[in-house]
Image: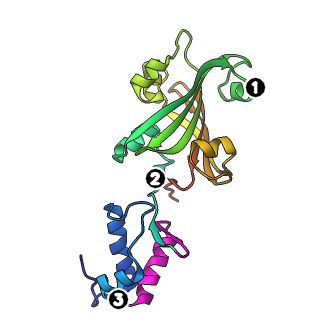
């Protein structure tokens, strides 16, 4: 176990925080499993109780651990970070992070577009669109529910087998000559309603991050209107801005 540097100008509590963060990232402390007690940390790192408490408070503020009165301190499931400045699919993002991904198909059908969907996809009302609803899983746990309304080029269609073989809706759209290249999207916080809470294994009213948008082809044709309901405790979105 690396010791803390008492000659460093960096405060001991911050060094301890960094040491514990490294152990969290390495998977030494499993999500929802007890962390070492204050006494154990004092003994391991040879620091005072106040130093331990300052480090643990900093970790809690960063959302890396949580406390249960009378039971102890526990590691949190790490949040999935996704960039809003890059157009990429859920599958692609997770694979780049070495996260095991899976999807459970909840609904798949062709249906007439209602007024709101038709407007998003620049279609006449009641025009046929493909409706796809999927539960997205990361490392076996539910993280998002994805609703897609898809407008395909004339003469094209989608089957369940094609979607499962492609693994990604956007990969399949590329095969259908409707490659996504840009999107408009919004992000807002909502509360989980009963059906959504059940699918995502959350309490009713838990925070959900709703990402909604329209995806366009290189010719500016809208090909997908989507709503993605992300678990607020598992996701964070990153935006890089310059002036």
What's the residue at 31%, 85% (across, down)? Answer: 43
Q: Position of residue 228 (x, y in %)?
A: 58, 40
Magenta-tinted stretch: 47-70
Q: Earlier in the sequence, mark 3 or mark 1?
A: 3
What's the residue at 33%, 46% (across, down)? Answer: 98
Q: Is residue 78 left or right of residue 213?
A: left
Between 134 and 169, the residue placed more toward the observer is 134
Residue farthest to the front?
70
Q: Which mark is residue 81?
A: 2
Disc 1, SS: helix
The quadrant of the picture occupied by the N terminus is bottom left
Can you see residue 177? no
Q: Of the residues tagged 3 and 1, which is closer to the observer?
A: 3
Q: Position of residue 171 (x, y in %)?
A: 42, 27
Q: Position of residue 163 (x, y in %)?
A: 46, 23
Q: Is residue 207 above or below residue 7?
A: above
Q: Residues within 10 Å of mark 2 (few under 14, many from 20)?
A: some
Question: Magenta span has 21?
Answer: no
Q: Residues within 10 Å of mark 3 (few under 14, many from 20)?
A: some
What's the residue at 54%, 9% (across, down)? Answer: 155
Q: Which residue is mark 3?
A: 47
Q: Which residue is mark 1?
A: 115
Disc 3, SS: loop
Q: Position of residue 16 (x, y in %)?
A: 36, 79
């Amino acid at each position: 176990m690396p010791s803390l540097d008492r000659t460093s100008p960096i405060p001991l509590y911050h060094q301890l925080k960094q040491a514990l963060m490294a152990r969290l990232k390495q998977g030494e402390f499993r999500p929802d499993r007890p962390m070492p007690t204050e006494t154990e940390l004092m003994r391991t790192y040879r620091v005072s109780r106040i130093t331990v408490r300052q480090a643990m408070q900093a970790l809690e503020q960063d959302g890396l651990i949580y406390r249960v009165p009378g039971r102890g301190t526990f590691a949190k499931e790490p949040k999935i970070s996704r960039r809003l400045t890059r157009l990429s699919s859920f599958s692609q993002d997770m694979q780049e992070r070495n996260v095991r991904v899976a999807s459970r198909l909840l609904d798949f059908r062709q249906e007439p577009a209602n007024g709101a969907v038709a407007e998003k996809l620049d279609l006449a009302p009641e025009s046929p669109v493909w409706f796809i609803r999927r539960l997205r899983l990361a490392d076996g746990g539910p993280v998002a529910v994805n609703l897609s309304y898809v407008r395909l080029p004339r003469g094209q269609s989608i089957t369940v087998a094609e979607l499962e073989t492609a693994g990604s809706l956007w990969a399949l759209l590329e095969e259908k000559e409707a490659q996504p290249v840009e999107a408009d999207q919004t992000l807002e916080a909502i509360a989980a309603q009963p059906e959504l809470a059940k699918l995502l294994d959350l309490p009713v009213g838990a925070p959900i991050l709703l990402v909604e948008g329209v995806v366009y082809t290189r010719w500016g044709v809208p090909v997908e209107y989507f709503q993605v309901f992300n678990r607020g405790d598992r996701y964070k979105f990153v935006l890089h801005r310059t002036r």
